[in-house]
Amino acid sequence: MTRTGLVVSAFSNPPELDTAVSYASLKEVAAGRLPDLFRIHTPARIVAFGRQDTHSPGYEEAVASCEEEGFTPVVRLAGGRAAVFHEATLAFSWQTRTTQPKLGISERFEFITGVLVAALGSLGFEAEVGEISGEYCPGRYSIHVSGQKVIGIGQRLVDGAAHVGGVIVVDDRTSINRVLGPVYRALDLTWEPGVTGALADHRPVNMSDVAGQVIAELGKRLDLFDLALPAGLISQAALLVPNHQPPGR
C-alpha cells in the first residue's frame, strides 16, 4: 500500500488560504518533498469557481451575488463549475505523485469514488456514482443518494502529480441552493434545486461520523499516517492567496 500522509487541518483564515495550501502542497508532492497526501477538513463558507466560470460574461455578477449571501468567492484548483462549501460540508483532497498524470485520470476518480461509496455504505447510505440530470457542477463521478447529489469531485493535474478533490454535503442543502440561485443565473447555467442533497436529509449522521468512516475506508487501501504540514509551506501558500481570488478582490 502507498504510504500517504493524513492531514485533518483546515487553513481558512482567510478562506482562500485553504485552496492556496492545496496548491502549494501539490507542488511539494510533485517534487517529492512531501509524500502523497489525503486531507479532509471543515471549510469556510465559500463558492468555489472553476476556471471556466472565470471566463463567463456573468462572472463578476456571480462573485458579487455570493458575497451578498455571506460566501467568499474562491478560484479552485480542480475543474467543473461553481460549487458551494460551508460549515456542514467536508472538503477533501487526495494528492499523489505520478510521472504520467494524464494516464491515470479515470483510475484516480474510480479509486476515490470507491472509497466514498464504501464509506457511505458503512453509514447506511445506498450511494451511486454518475451524473444526474439537473445537478449543480455536473460530472460523471458525482455521488448521489436517492436521486440527490451529495458529493462532487474534480481533478487537477500538474507535472509530476495529481489532485483529486471535492465536497461532501453532510447537512444544510438549503444554504447551497440559496447561494447557487443567483450565482448560476449570473453564469447562465441551468440547474434543478431539488437535485441538491445532503446526507442528513436521508438518515441521521454527523460530520465526525462521515470523516471518520472516509478515513477508515481509505486506511484499508493506503498506508495512512498522521501528518502536519510544514509551517514553511503554509507561509508559502499565504503568498499564493491572490491567485485564488477573483480579479479586484
Image (tube, grey):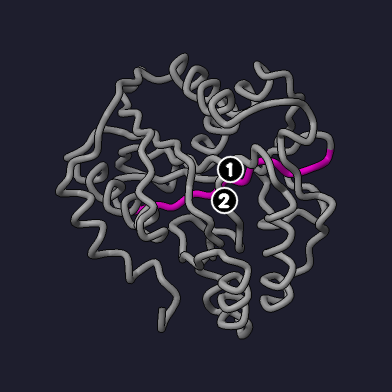
Is residue 150 one of those drawn in magenta? yes
Q: Residues within 10 Å of mark 1 (few under 14, many from 20)?
A: many
Q: Residue at x 49, y 17 (%)?
A: 216
Q: In the drawing, does residue 164 fall left or right of residue 7?
A: right
| Front residue (pair 98, 217) | 217
The residues bearing labels 2 and 1 have C-alpha atoms spaced at a distance of: 6 Å
Q: Residue at x 30, y 24 (%)?
A: 226
Q: Which residues are magenta?
A: 147-158
Task: Tell me residue 160's x, y (percent).
Answer: 29, 46
Task: Tell me residue 235's x, y (percent).
Answer: 19, 55
Is residue 19 one of those drawn in magenta? no
Q: In the drawing, does residue 232 fall left or right of residue 94?
A: left
Q: Residues within 10 Å of mark 2 (few under 14, many from 20)?
A: many
Q: Is residue 137 above or below residue 93?
A: below
Quarter occupied by residue 229: top left
Q: Residue at x 75, y 44 (%)?
A: 197
Q: Are marks 2 and 1 in contact (CB under 8 Å)?
A: yes
| Front residue (pair 211, 101) | 211
Q: In the drawing, does residue 32 fall left or right of residue 176?
A: left
Image quarter (top left, top right, bottom left or bottom right) of the N terminus? top left
Amino acid at the residue labelled 2: His
Q: Residue at x 51, y 68 (%)?
A: 73
Q: In the drawing, does residue 168 fall left or right of residue 175?
A: left
Image quarter (top left, top right, bottom left or bottom right) of the C terminus? bottom left
Secondary element at tag 1: strand
The residue at which mark 2 appears reads as: 86
Quarter occupied by residue 35: top left
Q: Residue 107 bears which disc, if any?
A: none
The residue at which mark 1 appears reads as: 89
What predominant SS class does the magenta segment belong to? strand
Amino acid at the residue labelled 1: Thr
Task: Tell me residue 177's x, y (percent).
Answer: 74, 58
